[in-house]
Amino acid sequence: MERIKILLFPAILLFSFLHFPTPSTVQATEYYALRVAGSDCILCHTDPGTGTLNQVGVLFQEQSYRYPLTWKGIFFYFLGGCAFFLVLLGLYLRYRLWRRGKGEGKWTRLRERWKGLFIYVFGQRGVLRSLFPGISHLLLFWSFLFLSFSIFIVLVQEYLFFPLLRVRFFGPESYPYYRLILDLLGIIGLIGTIFLACRRYVVGPKGLDNQRTDAISILFLSFVFLTGLSLTGIRNQLYQSSWSQWAPVASFTGWILKNIFEEESSLKAFFSALWWVHIFLSLTLLSYIPFSRIFHLFSSSLSIFFRNLEAKGVLTSIDLETSETYGVGTMEEFSWRNLLELDACMRCGRCQEACPAHLTQKHLNPKKVIQDLKRHMERPRKERERLHLIGDVLTEEVIWECTTCRNCLEHCPVFIEPMVKLIDLRRNLVLQHGKIPKETHFAFRNIERKGNPWGFDSEKRMWWTKGLGVKEVTPGEKVDILFWVGCYGSYDDRNIKAATSLIRILNRAGLDFGVLGNSEWCCGIDLRRMGSEYLFQVNVEKNMNRFQQIKFRRILTTCPHCFNTLKNEYRQFGADFEVIHYTGLLEELIRSGKIPMTSGGRTRKITYHDSCYLGRYNDGYEPPRRILGTIADVTLIEMERSRTKSFCCGGGGCHMWMEEKAGKRINETRVKQAEKTGAEILATVCPLCMISLDSAVKVLNLDERIQVMDILELVEERMKP
């Protein structure tokens, strides 16, 4: 589909070229009129229709085609200089705001960055995820970009290459094709602008908020496109250039205006006035760009180029020994890239349309977070110092309501990271001020002392494995697979069943695996997401010491949160082992025939809930579905919000230990979405999702209508004895 979109426009142009006659090389009137600032055809011609030259035209030829300077030209160059100065001033002012942030090296992996620039800027892949606004934006973007580039090429040609090298890119023979491209781009840009205006002011989706700059930008663009087409059309009508047919849209516009103005003198006067209107509008639009919504054309491109290329959702590590401050408490403590992202935000609302906190009527709105930070960045220094970033600009309620589901990052077309900024603010609250929600105190304390959030003794971690034939790996021993059971798989009754199913499946497949047993310690995922980087690093050090004492080929997890942390974040501390989630291994075992399955009886409808940390963080969308596809007696029905758009269970970011004090409960909202499918089973692959969703089913009294099960349980039930 994307290839078709890419090839469609050139194909249309080629088809158009074949249906136009060969251009005339005799009449160059329109060709030069495009290039001489402040000119029209009669500057050099007594009869533009035949190309007969006047004295200025003769002089123009005798002086080797050096353009005569007129008062119109002088005034035009003066206005152009002013516009150029304002553009540079605006760019400098924005750059100065970004440089307030801390340094951050983002000049590595340049090949990936340039590739992303072409895919997401020129290819508009992120914007096209929403069809109508994506296509509208694509039409406007490409027309605006190519028209600007075309004008730039003309300026370089006429004021650099031709005076120095006597070389022109476009001559009388190639100009008609160039004229046709400009004509098509003009109408395409106007259509795209009208589409965007209709979406914003007629359709009016909830995700959009209207500001004055939106209307001004749309009006400027519309009038620049319209006056440009009208000027070319009127000139074609007045001077009857044989190239008029190469600008069909403009010529049609000119024909309409010619019929409105009955006398030719009136049309000429209107043409002269419209020329200056077009110039003023174009230069004003150019000057307005750094101060308007259109500036995202540059800032968004920079945001895409300098985007975070680390594994999805990996947080930066803090050097606790050398850092003077922890997290972010002022705007200057953000990195320069984070401040650049504030300017890159287009206020499209895609982040808030996917945010579970916002959709359940809580205080958090990721778009508003970015806009509030941007307004604070733009405040004068004294006012900025008077206001507290945490408290006055963003409240603690907003900061703590994030479930770290990564929906906002996934759906932003320009890679802005609201979630990461909120976690940086959490780090400041926890490490600088010692503030955490009261409900999480016991979980923090228990993880620090006992290695699990409930505070259970480590001796009880593996009591349920007795009789299952599980090998506890001791220092110096070697296994192929180290099964990382995790806190929920070790202590929560509901998830112990899923972990037991996995052990039985591994035994049936004859795999060499073992567990750390009582020496296993919490991986620290919730500590880091809550901002306690210190306790997280303490946990990492303990676990890394245990890993170094044994030998294994890869680590297997049931919990996507542990999976993401061990796989992606432990690498910051020297880990180089392979980590897999059980869905990848289970799919491999089923395909190889090591886990033969039978039908469980009648066919049952099932819907699958994508875990945030397996799906959005690690792109693990398909293995669970392929496993379900091998089960003969279940029919998979997708929820409306699935895969990249999947709704969070509400348990991430330490929210398993926090109360939802505002709006609706996230887990209950998700269960209601599952209920609408008519499914009897709500399948998951995450211990936190299991607890959250199972709890919601009970609260909503849906026990008899829908059952929450781990895919491991479904497979074990159908595993042949």
Image (cartoon, rainbow, N blue to C red):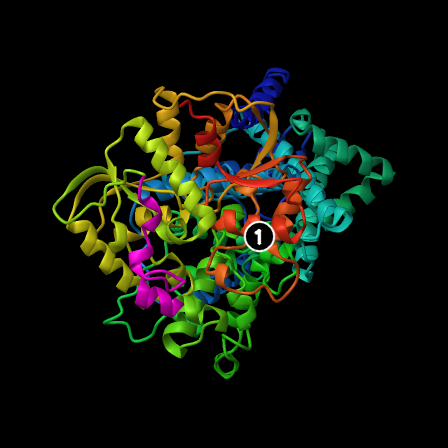
Q: In terms of depth relative to the viewer, which is nearer, 377 or 494?
A: 494
Which residue lies under the disc numbered 1?
Answer: 695
Q: In terms of depth relative to the viewer, which is nearer, 69 or 384?
A: 384
The image quarter containing residue 521 is bottom left
x and y percentages locating residue 695 in the rendered image: 57, 52
x and y percentages locating residue 633 in the rendered image: 56, 23
- Decide: few, some or many residues near mark 1? Use Cα within 10 Å; few <14, some 14-19, many ≥20: some
Q: In terms of depth relative to the viewer, which is nearer, 261 or 689?
A: 689
The image quarter containing residue 441 is bottom left
* Vertical relation: 466 (above or below) 341: above
The magenta stretch is 444-467
* Vertical relation: 503 (above or below) 525: above
Is residue 466 inside the magenta stretch? yes
> Which residue is depicted at the point 51% across and 21% down?
599
Kind of element beneath mark 1: helix
x and y percentages locating residue 111 in the rendered image: 32, 40
Left or right relative to 352: residue 550:
left
x and y percentages locating residue 677 in the rendered image: 67, 36
Q: In terms of depth relative to the viewer, which is nearer, 28 or 94?
A: 94
Disc 1 marks which amino acid?
Ser
- Mark yes or no: residue 166 visible: no
